[in-house]
Image: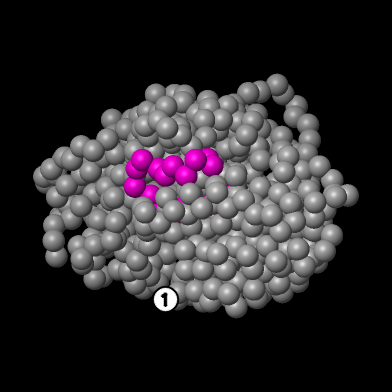
Amino acid sequence: MTSNRKVVGPAELADLLEELKRRSGRSYTALAHRTGLSRSTLHRYCRGTTVPGSFGAVERVARVCGASPAELDRLYRVWSRTTAAQDRADDVAVPAGDMRVPGDDVAGPGGAGGRPDEHGAHGGPPDAGAAQRPAAAAVVGRGGEPGKARLSPWRGLLPLRVMALVLVLLLVPAASTQLPGGDGPGSGGPPAGPGTGPGTGREGTTTAVQRFDGPLWSVAPRRVPPEFFGLTMNTDTGEMPGFRTGAVRLWDSGTRWGAIEPRRDRYDWSVLERSVDAAERRGLPVLLTLSGTPLWAAPDGRRSAYADSRPVPPADLADWDRFVEKVATRYRGRIEAYELWDYPSHPLHYAGSVAVLAEMVGRAARIIRRVDSGALVACPSFGELWEERGRELLRRFARTGAYGNCHAAALKLPPRRADSPPEEIIDLARHVRDVLYEEGVGQIPVWNTGPDRNVAVTPPLDARRARDYAVRFYLAGLYSRHYGVRRMYFYSWGSTGVPLVVQPVGGRPTEAGLRMGRLRQWLDGARISACGQGGQLGLPEGAYTCRFERDGTPFLVRWTTKGRVDVPVAQGERLLRRMDGRTVPLRAGDRIGFGEEPVLVEYRES
């Protein structure tokens, strides 16, 4: 992929996209039909006047144009540099219209295919509407008053570029403005299939993507269970978090199979025992990962990521059976769930065949059901799912039928990079849900068990990004409920060798950890009913809102991927809660500003 001029920033990304478009021979209309983006949006991307809010939109265009893996990698590097440069710019408050909480007049469920049942499973494929853009709206007066927006409960104003907005405000204060659509996490996706994209027609003929106003998804209020807010423990001390959380996952915590059974039939339960005891005292359900074959059980196995384990199945699967039965019997009623192998996507973690892994899952699941019928079983945590090879491995495992043995699919659903916006989790969750659906297991709940291996070599986040990322990790998971995500295990508690430290063992929680606990407190006893972002809700692209209720009284959580949004106080809004613990009473005529740091907006009791 070449470019005719030396450029940087948005122009560099635009040149690469324009070259792909030219090479493909497709018109903007044809690309719009295949990507689900509007012609005007594609034109802005290829001219450099707009930078896509998520890489998902770039990837869709590139794949339709036949980009190679190397070209996709280059596009991602350029897109990352461009958005990082924008992140360094000063935050600008961009007015967005009034967005009131939906009440009894909320439209029904946001999609025929994506509605979960009472047990958290989906009733069908992800709604095709998830990849479609919301309708444009005109600025109209409230009660005939010029210059203010009259909006439905999930509507507002989309932002124009800052300079354009200034000019509009100065020169055309009462103009009726056509509002653009956009592309961000939760609205992008794979190329649309027949009947899901814009209408077809001759080059130059106006075609329109089906648009909608309102949240991406809406359901009858569903409880947000405490165990949704999980942490992977990175310590063998048995210490537990010093802030509120909902569940713990034991891995990288001295509890591998190779550490528990260092010699055949000789068990060391000390580390696992103190970790389970501590979790029980705190009322935290435990997910124990069964992984890492002892050296004695696979003497000819290759080197592992861990000194006490091999990344291959045991030479005799009966050794695996005995270990699983020992653990399940000892911890009957004490360990809530078992994850059957961690990260089989990398040869340092698993170097056996998919067929043998599936057999190990089936054998372990049968033993656990027999010994502890109340325990849950999660299938292995496949990772590298941003890559085609990772998704293909997941497909191969699904085709074995092994998911029929599991209550959940434990998967690695990180952002594309460990320091990328956590909202990229939403893009990946959608792609993975499509894979599972295509393989006939789209109903299975997904538990996000953390990052890929690149987290170990990612530079630390700065303090501000760390505190905001920590909270938005869980919010992105709640948004991804539409794609089957039911639990989120943050990648590490206790470690200081990761990009985001929430609490060192023996130390105090960082601000990031404290804010994790505050979000958990905000949502204690809450039920979630809807989420949406950007133009769907009349907000700027990259601005997110999820609706909750507690005891029948609604509240919203709002945040952005970057920059600030400024909205007027809507009727019924009474209190703003901030992540630093401050509360601000709200009055008519006030404005609410929010950004990468989420805020909670409370309503008066119904």
Does the magenta stretch mainly form a helix, a strand or a loop? loop
Q: Is residue 244 visible?
A: yes
Q: Residue 538: x percent and y percent?
A: 35, 52
Residue 544 part of the magenta segment: no
Residue situated in front as seen by the camera: 237 or 491:
237
Q: Residue 345: x percent and y percent?
A: 73, 51
Left of 491 or right of it: where is 106? left
Can you tell which quarter of the image residue 73 is in?
Answer: top right
Q: Is residue 593 visible?
A: no
Q: What residue does disc 1 label?
A: 118
In this view, the residue farthest toward the front is 266
The secondary element bearing badge 1 is classed as loop
Residue situated in front as seen by the camera: 314 or 414:
314
Quadrant location of the N terminus in the rendered image: top right
Q: Residue 290: x percent and y percent?
A: 64, 57
In this view, the residue farthest toward the top is 6
- Mark 1 surroundings within 10 Å by alpha-carbon count, few (fewer than 14), some (14 through 19), many (20 or more): few
- Rendered position, 101 above or below 332: above
Stretch of the chain drawn in magenta: 235-251
Left of 312 or right of it: where is 262? left
Q: Residue at x 33, y 50 (%)?
A: 520
Q: Residue at x 40, y 43 (%)?
A: 241
Residue situated in front as seen by the camera: 192 or 492:
492
Can you tell which quarter of the image residue 369 is in?
Answer: bottom right
Residue situated in front as seen by the camera: 108 or 510:
510
Left of 465 or right of it: where is 45? right
Can you tell which quarter of the image residue 407 is in?
Answer: bottom right
Please, what is the three-letter code of the amino acid marked with disc 1? Glu
Q: Residue at x 65, y 54 (%)?
A: 267
Q: Residue 238: x percent and y percent?
A: 47, 44
Q: Residue at x 50, y 62 (%)?
A: 335
- Rendered position, 286 above or below 582: below
